[in-house]
Image (cartoon, rainbow, N blue to C red):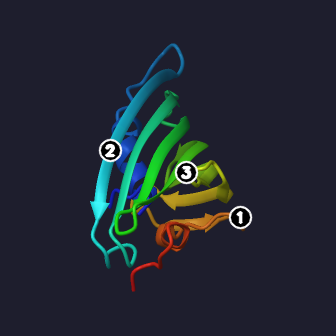
Amino acid sequence: MAGAVLTAGTMLGVLAPVAGSTPAWADGPQHVRSTFSAEETVPAGDLCDFKYHNEFTQITNAVIFPDGTEIDQGVIHATHTNVDTGFTLTETDYFSLQFRPGQIKEAGIQWHLRTPDGRLIVVHAGNIVFSDTTGDVLSFTPNTNPDFAAVICPALGGHPAI
C-alpha cells in the first residue's frame, strides 16, 4: 500500500493494534469497529518520478475469535495526487483481511481508481497473501499487482522511481 503509502506495511501497521490485543473470551468472538485516517507526501524519486501525496480513511469492522483468528471487513477511501501536475485520482476499495498464524490474506478490491470526472481507469481485484511478520508478499492472484508504485505512478502520469 507503499512506508505508509497504503501498502501491506500500512495496512499491517493500522490493524496491528486490533490484531495483537486478543484476550480469551468464554462467550464468543469480539466485534471491533475502527476508523483511521492519514496522509503523507513522498518526495520525487522515492516512490514515483514526481512528488506524490496520499490521503485516506480506512473503516474496519473486525471479528476477533477467542483462538486469535481475526477476520476484518474494510473500506478505504483515498485520494492520490501527482503534486507536480496537480492531477488527482480517487479510490474506494472494499476488501476483507484474514489473520492467521504466519500470514494475512487480503481478498477484494485492491485498486479502483477514478479520474476527477468519474472515469474508472484502474481496477484490480483478487487475493494477496502477506507474511504477518515482514509484510512480504507470499502469493497473489493474476488480476492484482502487489507493486504499489507500478500501479499508482503510471496512473498519475509518471513512472516508478528507479
Question: For residue 138, what is the image quadrant?
Answer: bottom right
Q: Residue furthest bottom?
A: 162
Kindly state the secondary structure of the residue where label 2 is placed.
strand
Please name the residue shown 33% across and 38% down the image: 17
**Mark 2 and mark 1: span between their CA atoms?**
27 Å
Kindly state the secondary structure of the residue where label 1 is placed.
loop
Q: Which residue is mark 3?
A: 116
**Mark 3 and mark 2: span between their CA atoms?**
21 Å
Residue 8 in picture, x, y percent from top left: 45, 57
Label 2 Cα neighbours within 10 Å, binned few <14 / some 14-19 / many ≥20:
few
Q: Nearer the viewer, mark 3 or mark 2?
A: 3
Q: Which residue is mark 2?
A: 38
Q: Is residue 5 above or below residue 117?
A: below
Which residue type carries mark 3? Pro
Is residue 56 among the parts visible in the rendering?
yes
Task: Report the side of 20 relative to 27 (left or right).
Answer: left
Please give the label number shown on residue 143: 1
Residue 98 in picture, x, y percent from top left: 57, 44
Residue 80 in picture, x, y percent from top left: 44, 56
Q: Nearer the viewer, mark 2 or mark 1?
A: 2
Which residue type carries mark 1? Asn
Q: Residue furthest top?
A: 27
Label 1 Cα neighbours within 10 Å, binned few <14 / some 14-19 / many ≥20:
few
